[in-house]
Image (cartoon, rainbow, N blue to C red):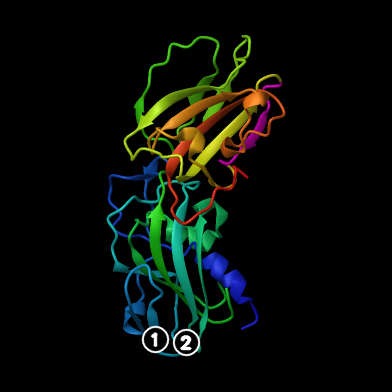
Amino acid sequence: MRKTAAALITLGLAALALAGCSAGPSFAGKACPTQPTSSGLKSSVTVEGDFGSEPKVKLDTPTKVPKLSVDDLIVGKGTQITAASQPFAANVVVYNGATGQRIGASSDVATLMSQSKEFASAVQCATEGSRLLVGFPAGTFADAATVGIVDVQKVFLPHAEGSLVYNDALGLPTVVRAPDGRPGIIIPDAKKPAKQVTQTLIRGDGPKVTKNDVLRVQLTSVDWDTRKVLKSTWDTQAVAISGAELAGQTVGSQVLLVIPPADASQGTGSDGAGTQAIVVDILGVDTSASASSGQ
């Protein structure tokens, strides 16, 4: 096998598939598209072990995969992947279909848009708590067919979800939202605050955040004076930040922070260069991550 195991494992993080998709959830505003179906992979692959732990896997070699295929070994009942920028955490182990050899294993947080077209096609609509058996034809990621076993450990919210909160504070930025939840920040023609302001825009229905939590969030930061976007995770990857600045908020909430340089905090992604307006969508508590200071 000439392609590296590291590349396969990275790509394998997206090898998630349909796990009980229903007509209710949506994908980028549309019904979940048709997913790859099984091509009989279960008959040649044996998978044993508890969810969340690396399974014992045996392949009848050579295992051939005529087309991209997915089997649900365990169907999860948790949150579903419904958006390209929605983060999810998965454990993946990958095998060479020709030899049955274990190529490698990995655990990470990924999004559909950070993966290849083939993996994204398999990932969409997967649900938290699912164990998936995914087959990739020869030539997709390696010379031989490859087989991945994926445990979908955690699926975070795609964006803030909850009840809109009425705020009557004058002179603060206005936040508008695209259909996918992405916020736009409109800075007013007003004197900027001298002290930090925190305003809840959407109140989520999830658990309350504590100062010791590590949160997976989407955030957008705009410079008050120039009106320019300084940072946005919506086009890259949701990040892990400390819950210290957001303690008392709830998962699913959207929070506006206006932070002068004197109050700048790395915990919210502010760099201290000037007064910033930051909109944070709290997607969930990430028990496996350490705070990245918004980087």
Residue under the point 29% across and 59% down:
76
Residue under the point 46% across and 69% down:
92
Above or below for 158 versus 120: above
Task: Characterize the local packing of mark 1: few (<14), some (14-19) or many (20 or more) Cα atoms within 10 angstroms.
Answer: some
Name the secondary structure under disc 2.
loop
Q: Is residue 147 left or right of residue 190?
A: left
Residue under the point 46% across and 44% down:
212
Pick the residue in front: 201 or 158. Answer: 201
Q: Which of marks 1 and 2 is nearer the N terminus?
A: 1
Q: In this view, does 42 lie to the left or right of 120?
A: left
User: Label 1 is placed on what type of residue?
Assistant: Lys
Q: Name the residue under label 1.
A: 58
Residue stretch in magenta: 226-234
Q: Residue 232 carries which label?
A: none
Residue under the point 43% across and 24% down:
201
User: Label 2 is placed on what type of residue?
Assistant: Gly
Q: Name the residue under label 2.
A: 100
Above or below for 289 versus 30: below
Above or below for 293 versus 128: above
Q: In this view, does 232 lie to the left or right of 46?
A: right
Which quadrant would the N terminus be assigned to in this image? bottom right
Pick the residue in front: 43 or 268. Answer: 268
Looking at the image, do the residues carrying marks 1 and 2 touch, with CB atoms under 8 Å apart? yes
How many discs appear? 2
* Separation (CA) of disc 1 from disc 2: 7 Å
